[in-house]
Amino acid sequence: MQTIMDPQWDESSPIYRQLRDRVVAMILEGVLKEGDPLPSVRSVAADFRLNPLTVLKGYQQLVDEQLVEKRRGRGMFVSLGARKALMKDERQRFLEDEWPKIYATIQRLGLSQEDLQRAAAAPPASWPSPAAKGAASEGQESSEGEEDERSN
């Protein structure tokens, strides 16, 4: 199985924790489904040039959280109910940690419910339009980027 993870690590937290968080994101996004095998410790260590013990520590956190189960001689697999448990935990974390900050910003900016509904109905401005994607695929992306830099 080919690993589908971002190979970039940052200094904000230990690599084993970032690895754990990436596997959690893959489960939440449906890239890894219940019963799916995790990439082997050896392959992740080799692909990302990590110490196998670092990978094992990240995986062990998932086992400790009962999101992944070890099958002797076969590897590690996403546990049944892992996505549901993660959704519950992540929703709770969002409501406790993120929502108060977002709500405070909404209040500070004086945004109305209508403003928010209108913004939710439209794609974010940072997303390229389908026409822009077509232009970029024709090699016109660099000229757009140059125009953006000049306007700043």
Image: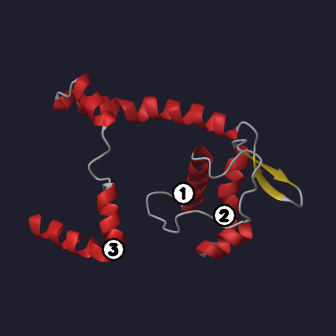
Residue denoted by label 3: 138
**Rendering coords of residue 115 (x, y %):** 22, 29
Give the side of residue 93 with respect to residue 85, left or right.
left
Which-is-in-front pick, marks 2 and 3?
3
Amino acid tagged 3: Glu
Amino acid tagged 1: Gln
Residue denoted by label 2: 55
Seen at 31% across and 54% down, the residue is: 129
Residue denoted by label 1: 18
**Rendering coords of residue 117 (x, y %):** 29, 28
Q: Secondary structure at mark 2?
A: helix
Q: Quadrant of residue 43?
A: bottom right
Dot 1 or dot 2: first in sequence order is: 1
Work out which quarter of the rendered image holds the N terminus and state it. Answer: bottom right
**Rendering coords of residue 137 (x, y %):** 36, 71
- Which of the pair 6/144 is nearer the observer? 144
As measured in the structure, the alpha-carbon distance from the residue carrying label 1 to the one carrying label 2 is: 10 Å
Dot 2 or dot 3: first in sequence order is: 2
As measured in the structure, the alpha-carbon distance from the residue carrying label 2 to the one carrying label 3 is: 40 Å
Q: Where 47 falls versus 127 (above or below)?
A: below
